[in-house]
Amino acid sequence: MFSNGNEHPKLEEVKKLSSGYGDRPRKMYKITCSDCGKEAEVPFKPTEGRPVYCKECFQKHRKY
Ligand SMILES: [Zn+2]
């Protein structure tokens, strides 16, 4: 992995905590759809307290 160098221990911790940091197109977040209850993955970080939908339901809800 990382050899010693510019990386500070604290920085590494931050990186682990915010693993979605930066633009990583393949980073997916597991969610449980608020509509059908199915498990799904979304390419964005779900906002706490807000409903998240699987792809199907997301499109359904967008049309409103
Ligand atoms: Zn759904």
Image: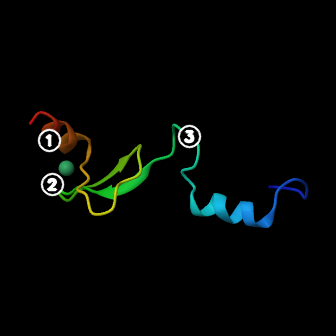
Query: Which label number is shown at residue 24?
Result: 3
Quadrant location of residue 38?
Answer: bottom left
Q: Are marks 2 and 1 in contact (CB under 8 Å)?
A: yes
Instruction: Please state if 3 lies on the left or on the right of 39 as rendered.
Output: right
The amino acid on which the numbered mark 3 sits, given as a three-letter code, is Arg
Alpha-carbon span between mark 3 and mark 1: 26 Å
Alpha-carbon span between mark 2 and mark 1: 9 Å
**Residue found at x 57% / y 49%:** 21
Residue that mark 1 sits on: 61
Image quadrant in which the N terminus is located: bottom right
Q: Choose between 42 and 14: the one closer to the eye.
A: 14
**Residue found at x 21% / y 42%:** 58
Query: Which label number is shown at residue 35?
Result: 2
The amino acid on which the numbered mark 1 sits, given as a three-letter code, is His
Q: What element carries label 2?
A: loop
Q: Do the residues labelled 2 and 3 touch (CB within 8 Å)?
A: no
The amino acid on which the numbered mark 2 sits, given as a three-letter code, is Asp
**Residue found at x 19% / y 59%:** 37
**Residue found at x 81% / y 61%:** 8
Q: Choose between 40 and 17: the one closer to the eye.
A: 17
Q: Give the mark nearer the N terminus: 3 vs 1.
A: 3
Q: What element carries label 3?
A: loop
Can you tell which of label 2 and label 1 is closer to the viewer?
1
